[in-house]
Image (cartoon, grey):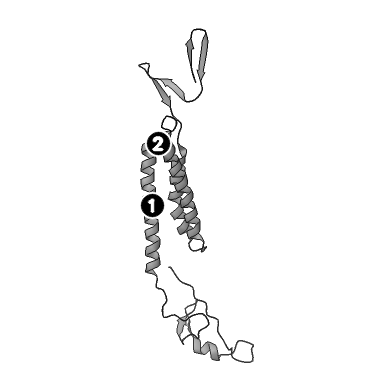
Amino acid sequence: SAGKSSGSAVVVMTKPHYHMRPKGVLLMQRSFNWRPWVGFLIIFLAPLTFFALYEKTGAAIWISIALIVLGVVLLWDGVRRSYVQPETYRGKVSGTVLAVVALLIIGGFGFVNYAMHQAYSKGQHSPKVGEKAPLFVAKDATGHEVKLAELLHTSVVGGPQAPRAVLLVFYRGYW
């Protein structure tokens, strides 16, 4: 705070803060505008969170979208503050640059998600739930060939008769 003396009264100014330049010109000391930086950081981390959680949870896209929305709100509020209250908050240029880069990140994230969705087949000719599976030969986890026909006609170890059904579990591999 700076004090000015006018006669016998002393005026104390607490906000905004001023400091003197060498030539005697008062300059205003503006507050750091943290909102655009935190918003940008959240937007930057949202796609990374998506790709880290993609294999673990089906809700990864919603978590990323929620983070992007939170980041956009913070970024927008910070940029708005720097333009509406320039005497109090810094960050017109940095906030605008961060907003443009954040839009590029969001656009790139959307494009990558779209491209990933298009890259994997839809399984148009695959059997539907409850349909009878076609006879096939596949390799199990140990590399041995497994035939559906053999599974249906071979009795289970210790069982009196062959099974009437086989449960098939398909894992969509991304490796």
Q: Classify mark 2: helix, strand or loop.
A: helix
Nearest to the observer: residue 48 or residue 125: 125
Nearest to the observer: residue 125 or residue 167: 125
Nearest to the observer: residue 59 or residue 149: 59
Relative height, residue 149 to residue 33 (above, below): below
Give, as a three-letter code, the residue at label 1.
Answer: Ile
Question: Can you identify the residue that label 1 sits on?
Answer: 105
Spot occupied by residue 95 in the image (x, y as percentages of width and height):
39, 40
Work out whether residue 105 can be spotted. Answer: yes
What residue do we see at 49% from left, 64% from top?
A: 55
The image quadrant that residue 125 belongs to is bottom left
Residue 76: numbered disc: none
Callout in the foreground (1, 2):
2
What residue do we see at 40% from left, 61% from top?
A: 113
- Judge the density around disc 2: few (<14), some (14-19), many (≥20) Cα neighbours within 10 Å: some
Work out whether residue 37 can be spotted. Answer: no
Spot occupied by residue 26 in the image (x, y as percentages of width and height):
40, 20
Earlier along the polypeptide chain: callout 1 or callout 2?
2
Please say if the residues under marks 1 and 2 sit with CB atoms less than 8 Å apart.
no
Q: Classify mark 1: helix, strand or loop.
A: helix
Relative height, residue 132 to residue 91 (above, below): below
Mark 1 to mark 2 CA distance (whole Å) = 23 Å
Give, as a three-letter code, the residue at label 2.
Answer: Tyr
Nearest to the observer: residue 174 or residue 75: 75
Spot occupied by residue 143 in the image (x, y as percentages of width and height):
47, 78
Residue farthest front in this picture: 84
Relative height, residue 123 to residue 150 (above, below): above
What residue do we see at 39% from left, 48% from top?
A: 102
Quarter of the picture holding the C terminus = bottom left
Residue 83: numbered disc: 2
Spot occupied by residue 32 in the image (x, y as percentages of width and height):
45, 34
